[in-house]
Amino acid sequence: MDLATATLIPLDAVDPALVEALLDRAFGPGRHGRTAYAIRQGTDWLPSLSFAALDAEEYLVGTIQAWPVALTDAEGRAHPLIMVGPVAVAPERQDQGFGRALLAAQQAAMDPRAPLPQVLIGDAPYYERFGFTAASTGGWRCPGPFDPARLLVRADNPAILPAEGLLGPWRG
């Protein structure tokens, strides 16, 4: 893909029905039952950190969303995080750089003065190149089944995060 022909726009500028159709194509119609949906249940995605990728013909080929979530520790304290995802690219347009461009745009939009740690459930070999790791998430729990090797976090200082806790929506 020639990134010069790709256009990234705010996700809220795209018809929500088109976004839902792309997510269904990328993840299947049963995607709402996944644990990531339970983690962010009842929250709204963050428009300033959510983007869409359009190809040269201006077709929607990818999206990325960000959600306010928290890791609640044993004392009941909520530690805010940003949940990245879903990162979706149309199946026929994968491996063309759209996912990388969306992740880069989201990272560039983060406030460098107060960067919140970001968490996602995804393929470690893919997301490690963007700084995500499972090294500090071993004691974290989710409100549903998940593969601990796929629970990844990116943080400037992972030592500030609790070693144990439950991920869920942040309603701070």
Image: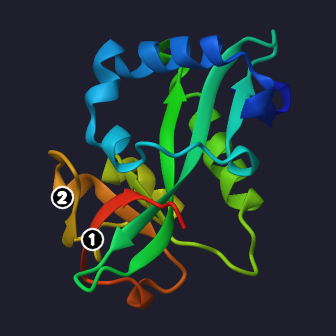
Query: Where does the image place residue 61, in percent across and percent down from the top left?
Result: 64, 19
Apparent side of residue 82 relative to residue 101 in the rendered image (left or right): left
Query: Where does the image place residue 148, in percent across and percent down from the top left?
Result: 18, 58
Q: Is residue 45 above or below residue 14?
A: below
135 or 21, nearer to the observer: 21
Q: Is residue 97 visible?
A: no
Residue at mark 2: 148
- Residue drawn where x is 62% and y is 11% of the image: 17
Question: Secondary structure under badge 1?
Answer: loop
Residue at mark 1: 137
State yes or no: discs 2 and 1 in contact (Cβ < 8 Å).
Answer: yes
Apparent side of residue 42 relative to residue 124 in the rendered image (left or right): right
Q: Is residue 156 above or below residue 98?
A: below
Question: Secondary structure under badge 2?
Answer: helix
- Residue drawn where x is 66% and y is 48% of the image: 46
Apparent side of residue 18 relative to residue 109 in the rendered image (left or right): left
